[in-house]
Amino acid sequence: MPVGQRRQPVIGAKDVAGAVDEIEMRHGPALAQAARRTNILSVGRGRSPAGPPSLASSPVKPSLARRRHMTWKPLLAAALLAALTGGNATLSPAQTAAPAAARPSPQPFSSSRISVQVSGTGPDVILIPGLTASSDVWRGTVAGLPGYRYHLVQVSGFAGTPVRGNGSGAVIAPLAAEIARYIETRQLQRPALIGHSMGGTLAMMVAAQHPSQVGKVMVVDMLPQPAGIVGASASGVRGLADALRGLGDSEDGRRVIASAIRMFGNADADTRPSDPDLVARATHELALTDLGPALAKIQAPLTVVYASPDASRNAAADRSYASGYGGKKGVRLIRVDQSGHMVMYDQPAKFRAALKTFLES
């Protein structure tokens, strides 16, 4: 027998008869008769080993951003922008003997707002990056945790990609709708949703608005009210958010946006710039978002991983996230110490350990 091949169980006549009876009871005489004819009642169990994902290794960790004082109102708005920048189940014999009423094949997915790259094999996991970020932020995570079929979302207009359908109008709600449509079109069975920063907001929106489509959710360093990242609230930050939205209207304002993105950790800001008007509109919408009332609509288990840069901020971070997610019963909060906003880069081993536990639970 080749190495690694699983020996099939020996099945006696009594076992076969009992199994056929169970098939008839569960699924009717037609399937039972088919089982008697073929005598195929032994189903190999266990997960097929998944090959490594085809993605490249993790990009170089971006350098830590230096904090600067901002006194002008546009720069305060840029600070708000920067704070929000992404700067096994085994089937039973009864299940496998289910009638093969042929399901339609998944349809090709086409969107002008997002693109999706698929890598690996196994249970489905959708990875959503943050504001201005590329799907490349997940490459190290994917390479370090094989055994899943990863769907890496790229938002059009971020990280050097053409803006296409995100060129005008609302951003956040349409993006969430497109992710939900992707799940439906590709016929994914309750995938896990993992989102960093703005991606966490999108993951929660999909889970709240389409609860039957989502198996579990992980949010990475984002509050239900994104304005809470800078100690504000959605209701109290409107003036600042409105000032931010206007930054994209002038060349000086666009330079401020680009500078803020570079300063707060997006290593690709120069080589793969994001569309400044899209960034301004998306940040304006995030600043005014409050998903607190929607938390109770999320039926899937929710895990939140959040960063604390040093021990002096641990207690404040704990209070902020416990308060922010108080409306979701059973939420699991995981603090990652000595980390900035880009937890996947700053503490990759700790993040992968938390993700492994989340996916296996």
Image (spheres, rainbow, N blue to C red):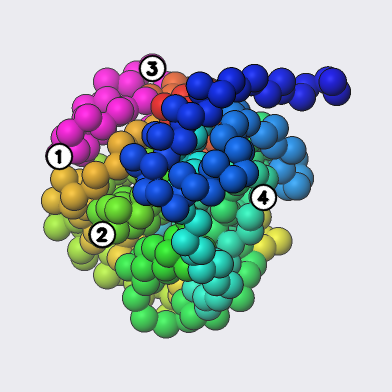
Q: Which residues are magenta?
A: 306-334
Q: Which mark is first along the chain, 3 or 1?
A: 3
Say which mark, if any, is on residue 209.
2
Instruction: Indicate whether 345 appears above or below 117.
Output: above
Estimate the spatial distance between the alpha carbons at disc 1 and disc 3, rounded to whole Å: 27 Å
State the SS at label 4: strand
Q: Residue furthest right?
A: 2
Q: Residue at x 55, y 41 (%)?
A: 36
Q: Residue 235 or 219: which is nearer the viewer?
A: 219
Estimate the spatial distance between the alpha carbons at disc 4 and disc 3, rounded to whole Å: 37 Å
Q: Which residue is mark 4?
A: 119
For discs 4 and 1, the disc positioned in front in the rendered view: 4
| Three-letter amino acid code of the residue under disc 2 | Gln
Using the rendered view, name the quadrant where residue 348 is placed: top right
Q: Which residue is mark 1?
A: 327
For discs 2 and 3, the disc positioned in front in the rendered view: 2
| Three-letter amino acid code of the residue under disc 3 | Ala
Q: Residue at x 59, y 31 (%)?
A: 42
Q: Is the residue under label 3 in contact with that under label 4 (CB below 8 Å)? A: no
Instruction: Indicate whether 208 appears above or below 138.
Output: below
Residue 22: x, y in percent?
39, 34
Say which mark, if any, is on residue 311.
3
